């Protein structure tokens, strides 16, 4: 069964580059920089990566951000992330990058983007995975910082397809980012926001009404609002769901009670993603397997989720057609689940 799920062609639309850092690489990066870190071994990191709640997760994430001290580290981090994706038969990735976190710590945006693109090009050659970059504007830094990152993207737009806001959704609502999103749209960037993960349905409404987002990251709390569910369906707003992440940060109690089954059955445009695979000890094979085991998703339904990801991706129309065709061909070769 897991062998068949592994063979399904897939796409990752919501995966954070730093959240994918291999633990060994994190230790190597710390060693390289000669800095004092709150962990010295893989066991230490695994212990640190047990979260009490969403706020605790954000604080642990920030400790890892502190460990990255050189722009060139991102080449290795993204290359290894894409190698791990390829192992799950992922063919297309929108790699989220929280640039401002690192700018704040003294790093240069153009050098980071170049490092990411070197890793992306190598991954395409070595593993056949195709990727674009989505920039998380880091909502905790506020809208002015968001504008400053847009200035940088304008100067260095290489392979960047969208903007997003991730972070402490409960403390920083979407509305003040409206002018930032308006400008991003004028720049030709696609629009996404984390919403309905650590805050209620109003946060999703605000992301839709004030930021005009095309996709919602997480969207879990939409289940509390039937009118919102209908709106998401009618407007064909895609939801980037991250089931294992939601269990690990305590947003839902277990996979069996995750609303993805309800969303899928209600006809919402659902995609499945691993969010921060290293931090949550998951990957896309595991996400799909959990859905099969605990929420009874059939192979056909899982394949529909893969196709949804291609359909709502920020790839050019023709590339979507080509990928869909190759996915269909691969799917026909798979045996029954
Ligand atoms: Zn995320």
Image (tube, grey):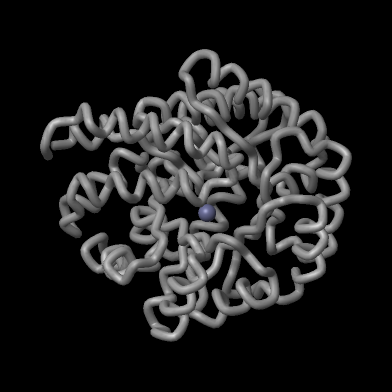
Can residue 205 be seen by looking at this rendering?
yes
Question: Who's the residue at 41% across and 50% down the image?
Answer: 308
In the rendering, at what x and y percent does residue 220 appear?
Answer: 41, 69
Q: Residue at 23% across / 32% down in the picture?
A: 332
Residue 184 in percent (x, y) is at 78, 56
Along the line of sight, which residue is nearer the eye, 18 or 176?
A: 176
Q: Is residue 320 left or right of residue 111?
A: left
Q: Position of residue 110 (x, y in %)?
A: 82, 33
Q: Position of residue 53 (x, y in %)?
A: 43, 65
Above or below — where is 19 with respect to 128?
below
Q: Residue at x 70, y 34 (%)?
A: 159
Q: Is residue 45 above or below residue 213?
A: above
71 on left or right of 164: right
Give the residue displayed 75% in from the left and 63% down from the top.
181
Compared with 307, 233 (above or below) is below
Q: Which residue occupies the extreme top position in the image?
A: 126
Tell me the quadrant of the picture where the C terminus can be found. top left
Asked where in the image residue 97 lies, by quadrant, the reply is top right
């Amino acid at each position: 069964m897991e062998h068949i799920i592994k063979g399904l062609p897939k796409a990752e639309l919501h995966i954070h580059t730093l959240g994918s850092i291999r633990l060994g690489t994190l230790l190597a990066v710390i060693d390289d920089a000669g800095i004092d870190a709150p962990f010295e071994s893989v066991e230490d990191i695994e212990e640190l990566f047990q979260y009490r709640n969403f706020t605790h997760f954000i604080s642990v994430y920030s400790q890892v951000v502190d460990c990255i001290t050189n722009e060139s580290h991102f080449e290795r981090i993204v290359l290894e992330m894409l190698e791990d994706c390829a192992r799950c038969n992922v063919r297309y990735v929108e790699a989220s990058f929280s640039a401002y976190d690192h700018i704040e710590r003294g790093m240069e945006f153009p050098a980071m983007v170049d490092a990411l693109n070197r890793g992306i090009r190598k991954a395409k050659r070595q593993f056949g995975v195709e990727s674009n970059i989505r920039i998380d504007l880091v909502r905790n830094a506020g809208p002015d910082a968001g504008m400053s990152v847009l200035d940088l993207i304008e100067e260095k737009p290489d392979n960047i397809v969208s903007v997003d806001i991730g972070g402490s959704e409960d403390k920083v609502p979407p509305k003040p980012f409206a002018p930032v999103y308006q400008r991003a749209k004028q720049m030709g960037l696609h629009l996404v926001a984390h919403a309905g993960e650590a805050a209620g349905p109003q946060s999703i409404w605000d992301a839709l009404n004030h930021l005009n987002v095309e996709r919602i990251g997480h969207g879990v709390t939409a289940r509390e609002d039937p009118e919102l569910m209908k709106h998401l369906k009618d407007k064909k707003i895609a939801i980037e769901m991250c089931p294992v992440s939601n269990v690990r940060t305590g947003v839902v109690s277990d996979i069996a009670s995750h609303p993805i089954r309800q969303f899928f059955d209600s006809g919402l445009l659902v995609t499945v993603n691993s969010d921060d695979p290293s931090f949550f000890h998951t990957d896309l094979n595991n996400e799909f397997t959990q859905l099969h085991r605990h929420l009874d998703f059939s192979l056909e339904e899982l394949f529909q989720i893969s196709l949804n990801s291609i359909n709502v991706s920020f790839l050019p129309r023709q590339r979507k057609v080509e990928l869909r065709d190759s996915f269909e061909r691969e799917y026909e070769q798979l045996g029954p689940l």
